[in-house]
Image (cartoon, rainbow, N blue to C red):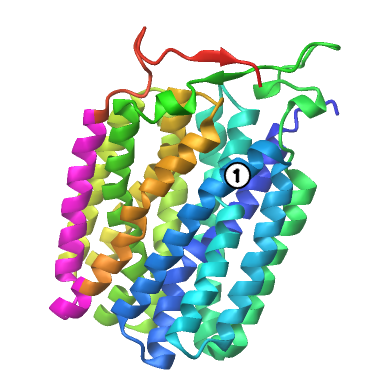
Amino acid sequence: MNRFPGWRVVTGVFIVLSTGSGLGFYGLAVYLNAFNNELGWEVSTLSLATTWFFVVSGVVGVGAARLIARHDVRVVVVAGGCLAGASLASLGQVREVWQLFAAYSAFATGWAMAGLIPLTTVVTRWFHRRRSVALSVASTGLSAGGILITPAAKWLLDREGIETGMPFLGAAFVVGVVPFTLWLIRPDPAELGWLPDGDRSEPGAAPARLVGTPFHQAVRSRFFVGVTIGYILALGSQVGGIQQLVKLVEERTDADTAALATLALAATSVVARLVGGRVVTAVPMMFFTACLGGLQMLAMLSLAFAESTVTIFASIVLFGATIGNILMLQPLLIAERFGVLDYPRIYSRTQLYGLVGTAGGPLLLGWLHDSAGGYRTSYAVAAACSLVGAAVLLWGGPARAPEPDLTDLAVAA
């Protein structure tokens, strides 16, 4: 193969992340709204199911990190895509709350196996010098899914209902993951005679060594603690805000306008992420992340009090500008500080701890909605979480460690 295949891998990751995001991350807000409308279940109950989804996915992510260290990442991703598709289709038969939790457990398992941990690991293996650009392009698939897939999913469920619509969404998940993983994604550049970033390996040369900070040293560092706690708060605010957004817009406007909410959110995040992938190469990465946390606070506070369509969508645009980059920057921060040696284990561990935020955010905002009779208090609390999260991130210190603190150790793969 004469042309560097790294960008084909990025394309494959983009497509798979688009599918998982559109039918999983953003899609959960659509399913919450559909079950609320069709079955009359309370928002707090459905928010608890969303929380459970993220709990299961976080726990499974730790196991997925161990699997991809021992097996071809494509096996894990394909298996996850098939499981997620089957469980998503089964949501059409859900009639009891316990059935929803059971289906979400299987869905979350497959979603994690075909999600950020294995896919960002692949990108970090293929790119070192140009990692921020490659990850920004690949992770733009998260937003593309919200633009292209989630509105279509909402339209289908609004038109056909859960029972008829969910099997189609399950089939779409499998089609969006399995063939593109097998066709485009390759686990490591070395097996094709390449080094990261497109350099050619010399014939007969020993495989490149994975360089970075060992897992046990990394997880004891102040930086790891700062990133983990900061992202618990920032992503708790963000994921909670996303999962409740469709319901908020529908309550304050109408169903047609609500259908455009995720489209506007994801479209803004696409543009912002592509810009951010280049900006982060010129400014301190941690400072940039903390600034985005401050902007997210402003977006949440604005959504708390916005009533007109114009102010709601202005707030959504600001929110989208932070979503695209905050989510992208978490794996970048981990890879920048700790290298690729134990990246899957370190990233999966911070995501596991981050479940307090990603799982608790939707539950907290849903409970506050039911308790206060609206979303004003919910989004005001989310704003406060974003602000505190930004402060904690700054406390964690810079992403590039000064000598001799946490110097990278070269360890044979």
User: Residue drawn 24% across and 66% down?
Assistant: 364
x, y percent for residue 396: 26, 29
Q: Could you tell me which quadrant the C terminus lies in?
A: top right
Image quadrant holding the N terminus, namely: top right
Mark 1 is on which residue type? Pro
Horizontal and vertical percent for residue 202? 81, 11
* Residue extending farthest top: 404
Quadrant in the rendering for residue 166? bottom right
Left or right: residue 188 versus residue 397 is: right
Q: Is residue 119 above or below residue 157?
A: above
Percent position of residue 268, x then y: 41, 53
Task: Classify 376 as above or below 384.
Answer: below
* Front-most of residues 308 and 353: 353
- Looking at the image, which residue is at 41% across and 67% down? 52
The answer to which quarter of the image holds residue 160 is: bottom right
Q: Secondary structure at mark 1?
A: helix
**Disc 1 packing (10 Å; few <14; some 14–19; many ≥20):** many
Region of the chain picked out in magenta, as a range: 368-395
Question: Which residue is tagged 1?
Answer: 118
In this rendering, would 16 be left or right of 279? right
